[in-house]
Image (spheres, rainbow, N blue to C red):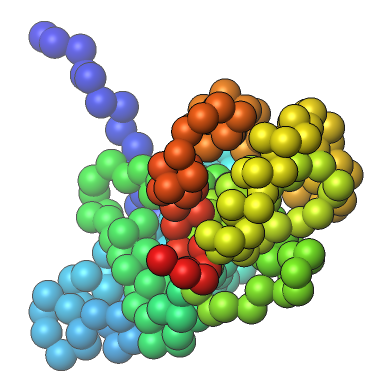
Amino acid sequence: MLPALVVENLPRLTRAIKQLAADTREDAAVNLADELTGITAMVAEKFTNDRTADGIQKALQLTVGGVSLGLEHSLMDQGDQAGLDFLVEHGAEAAFQVGFRMIKELAALPEDALVGEYDTDPVYAQRRLRDLFIDICQVDPNQNWNGPEKYATQLKQRKEVQAIVRLANWLRRHNSEGPVSDTDLNAEGVIALAIIFAVEGGGRVIARTGQKEFERFVKAVRKNKPDFEQGWAALVAAVPVQHHPVLLERIASYRNNCTVLHNIRGRTAMKTLFAELENYAGSELDADYG
């Protein structure tokens, strides 16, 4: 007989319910069934379809995932009996609310460093919440489930993106030529401009620029031959410490890989350099003239 290749990892709610067979608490099973029915009806009305069998089935699967995610967060490595105890003492609704709040907080975090009006529109925000809820919490009660791992991975990724966006927003607010307040944000582009222009020195914060200013910058670097490291140190000193991890990581990357910085001291044509800058800054460049 071949050994099992997959370790059973059923949803926490399923595992807790299996403990009911040996539980002596009066009405525990009935009360839990009533609660789960109520949650499923609510989920069907708000997220699937309470008028079709398929909608009710999906709602049940989302209820299982939502309650299980809440139990996982509340109990961590405590056993299946602890899961049942939580459900009996606090109710399935409490576990579901914990799980759903986790999904809601995750949906509020930026998914990538390109932020636009779409990201703050309440209709699209609701749609993103629904999609994320389904992606993480829809689970067959009798199938293995990796929802908590998927949630943890996405939370880590989105917090990293949030740190990038927050740095870019700080750079925009403190742009030396005046705050930049566009709705759309290319966070990586803002950070790229700040790091590239910082090599001139002086501690100025550049979060938005155009071709004329770039040409002035290139000529100044070629004439004055500034120490790039001193320029970056001045930029880091100007930026609050909570943004340093992202900024220092990006500086290290640009020190080794940025073609604009590698070519700026040589004889590369201005037009070529500006085209390379567009690759880094993207929509954060002002088109001041062609």
Q: Quarter-wise, where is residue 235 in the image?
A: top right
Q: Is residue 49 visible?
A: yes
Residue 67: x and y, percent? 45, 63
Residue at x 53% of width, y 60% of height: 211
Say which residue appears at 75% left-offset and 69% top-offset: 177
Residue drawn at the location 45% of the way across and 64% of the way down: 283
The image shows residue 124 at horizontal and vertical percentages of 38, 81
Residue 141 in the image: above or below residue 145: below
**Which residue is found at the position 78% from the left and 35% from the top?**
224
Image check: 4 left or right of 208? Answer: left
Which quarter of the image is occupied by the C terminus?
bottom left
Q: Nearer the viewer, residue 138 or 278?
A: 278
Q: Please identify the quadrant where the N terminus is shown.
A: top left
Quarter of the rendering containing residue 282: bottom left
Across and down, in percent, residue 103 comes to 48, 65
Query: Of 122 and 78, which appears nearest the observer?
Result: 122
Count of numbered badges drawn on the protein: 0
Farthest residue to the top: give it. Answer: 1
Q: Is residue 39 visible?
A: no
Q: Is residue 84 left or right of residue 45?
A: right
Q: Can you give x and y, in whole percent of width and height, for residue 226 in the image?
A: 78, 32
Please name whichever residue, 15 or 65, is drawn nearer the observer in this view of the structure: 65
Vertical placement of 110 versus 155: above or below? below
